[in-house]
Image (cartoon, helix red, strand yellow):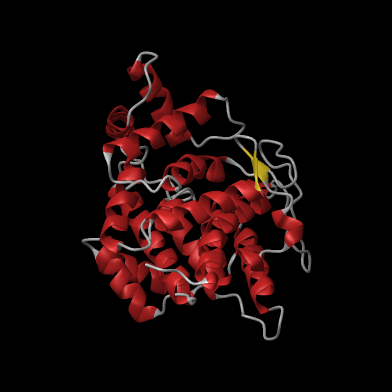
Amino acid sequence: MNLSTAQVDRAVGVLLGTATGDALGAGYEFDSVRLGPGERAAMIGGGLANFAPGEWTDDTSMAIPIARVAATGADLRTDEALDAIAAGFDEWYADNPKDVGIQTSQVLALARRASNDSPTTAATMTAAARSVHERTGRSGGNGSLMRTSPVALAHLDDPVALVEAAKKVSALTHTDPRAGEACALWCLAIRHTVLEGRFPGKGEFRAIASAASDDPMFWIECLYEAVDGPPSRFNPNGYVVPALQAAWSSIWHTVVPAGDRQPCEHFADSLDTAIRIGNDTDTVAAIAGALLGARWGGSAIPSRWRTQLHGWPGLREPDLVRFANASVRGSS
């Protein structure tokens, strides 16, 4: 698969879009700050964990281990790749992150104890996730969807491998099948958008849902509900299904401006819509940002935001660009 310059730019936009949406939404999470009428979302920092302006949260930090492994050209379905991702999650957790979801924290803490100071493997982490699910009866939070975008870049050439990888990476912390299906669906949408330069239409989303799930009508109805809107319907959005719906609804219901500023404006306007939904704003904006970046490319993300991006483990915009470029080469 030989990618054009525009396709590579869109692939770069996937990671930059994830981090931008994440950092932009961080200051507004759970109504830390509310946007007033006519006020635009900005990288204000703050939020529940007092992030610096432009600092990404756990959403992007957990995507980093996946992106690092994808950048090696690895097949993310393999034990070796999954072990490396699990070790990366453990490394992040050991650094006492400012922000970590309850479900993910329970899994990573249990996996660490089970590893007895040895490197945490994918098998150990997946078993810990199953144990937490069995104990609590739920593991369908949005925590695996928020970090899933690098999987799409690792398997641009193979949608079957993409679905398998997305579900396996999701299952490291989230046992609920809906979480894995949501990751597979969103990664397939990202793949389509990077390659085709347009968002999936209704017919294409039907095919994507069929590839991602044994129950495609569930997801087709969810996507149609998101199109019917309004975006504000999808609050709260801590569960994976309304989180995905909120992200898609924010994109669908934002008008694409005409003229030379079209890419930058639709990217920014859609994230503003996502953040106005409220509740888990950094996660919804990170999910939406990945697909928006896949459509408009890294070059369309306003430089005032790109240059502020930073976060665990001491990375900035050029590092995300490097990971994306290397991932695309690995999948070609």
Which residue corresponds to the image point at 67% horizontal and 70% vertical from the top-left?
269
Look at the picture and state if 240 lies above or below 105. below
Regarding residue 73, the answer to whether it shows in the image is yes
> Where residue 216 sits in the image (x, y, percent)?
26, 67
Query: In the displayed structure, does residue 193 sit left or right of residue 31?
Result: left
Task: Please name the residue shown 40% across and 37% down the image.
Answer: 85
Q: Can see residue 280? A: no
Nearest the camera: 209 or 81? 81
* Left or right of residue 307: residue 115: left
For the point 32% across and 28% down, the residue is 128
The x, y position of residue 306, in whole percent, is 70, 55
Question: On the image, which quarter does residue 108 sit in?
Answer: top left
The percent position of residue 193, horizontal first and vertical second, equals 46, 71
Position of the C terminus, as image quadrant, is bottom left
Q: Position of residue 84 (x, y in %)?
A: 39, 34
Q: Quadrant of residue 39?
A: bottom right
